[in-house]
Amino acid sequence: MTRYEMAWHNHRLSLGKHTLIMGILNITPDSFSDGGRFEDAGRAIRQAKQLVAAGADILDIGGESSRPFSDPVPEAMEIERTIPVIEALAGEIEVPISIDTTKAAVAEAAIAAGAAIVNDISALRIDPKMAAVAAAAEVPVVLMHMQGTPKTMQKSPVYGDVTEEVIAFLEKAAKEAEAQGIARDMIIVDPGIGFGKTVDHNLTLIRRLNQFHRLDRPVLVGPSRKAFIRKILAGGGDDTIVADDPSVIAATQAAITASVLGGAHIIRVHDVAEACTTLALADAISNAPA
C-alpha cells in the first residue's frame, strides 16, 4: 500500500503502515446511530475523551445529521452544537479534531476553535466558500462522494459502473480543490459508503477499494453501523435492526477488515475500542509478506 505523510501546523499523520481510526462524535438529536446521546456538551466532551483513550487517531465532530432523508440545520445551530465542545477539547487532546460539515462558516468557526481537518461530505460542492476556508487555514480536507444530498441520496440511486463513476467524481473533486488553493498533499478521498448507494453498490465499492489507489491520495472509508450492514443482517429486507445492536457492531468489523485489506488508510467508526482490536489483526494480515 502506498504510504503518505501528512504534516501541518502541530499535527502529523503517517498513513499506510497502520490503519488510522477516526472516531465519530455526533452532537445531534437525530443521527442514525447515536442521535441524542451526546447533545449535552459535557457528555459530548466525556465521550470524545473516551474515544481518544480507546485509540482514536482523529476525532470527527459533527453538528448536523447526514442520515438518509435528513434535513439540513441552520449554520448557527451547527456552530452552537459543535464549537463549545471543540474549544474544550482542543487544548486537552493531542489527536487532530475534524469538523464534519458542509458549511464554510461552520468550518471557519471550528478551525478558529481548534479543529484541524475539514470533513466535507459534499466534496466542497454545497458551499462555494468552503474551499477558500480550508485553503486559507492550510488544513487537510476529506472529499467524499455522495449522489444527491442526504435528503435525496437514497431515492433509487443508479450507476453504470459504481466504482469507476465514484473514482471519476473524486478525481475531479480533488483537481477542483487543488485549483482553489488546497494543497494536493492535504487531500483525503472517501468513496462515501452509504451515501447514495444500494447494498450492492456499497459491497462492490468495498470489494474494489484497491482501485481507488489510482487517485494517489489517502483513502478514508466509513462503513460503521451503516444501513447496508443492517439490511444484510436482516436477510436483505429493511434495516430494522437497531444501529448499536451487538450484531451490527460485530458485522461492522468484517467491513473494516475488508476495507483494510483493500487498502484503506483511515477507518471512520463509532466503536473505537472494537476497531482497535480488529485492526491489530487486519493490519498484520495486510502487512504480511506476500
Image (cartoon, helix red, strand yellow):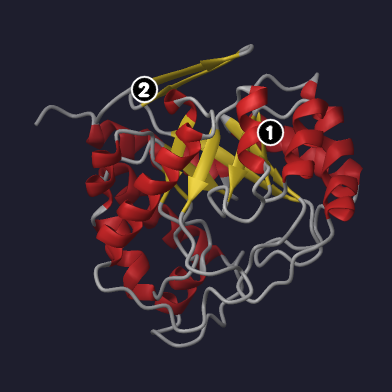
Residue 289 in the figure: left or right of residue 53 = left
Residue 273 is tagged as none
The amino acid type, in three-letter code, at marker 1 is Val
Q: Earlier in the sequence, mark 2 or mark 1?
A: 2
Residue 16: quadrant of the picture: top left
Q: Nearer the viewer, mark 2 or mark 1?
A: 1
Residue at 58%, 77% in the rendered image: 152
Residue 156 visible in the current orientation: yes
Residue 95: quadrant of the picture: top right
Q: Quadrant of the N terminus?
A: top left
The amino acid type, in three-letter code, at marker 2 is Tyr
Q: Nearer the viewer, residue 65 or 252?
A: 65
Residue 104 in the figure: left or right of residue 220 = right
**Residue 268: image location, x then y, percent:** 52, 46
**Residue 241: image location, x then y, percent:** 56, 77
Q: Residues within 10 Å of mark 1 (few under 14, many from 20)?
A: many
**Residue 35: image location, x then y, percent:** 75, 63
Q: Which residue is mark 2?
A: 4
Q: Are marks 2 and 1 in contact (CB under 8 Å)?
A: no
**Residue 30: image location, x then y, percent:** 76, 67
Disc 1 secondary structure class: helix
Residue at 60%, 38% in the rendered image: 131
* Relative vertical location of residue 181 with respect to residue 269 in this rendering, above or below: above
Residue at 32%, 73% in the rendered image: 159
Q: Which residue is mark 1?
A: 133
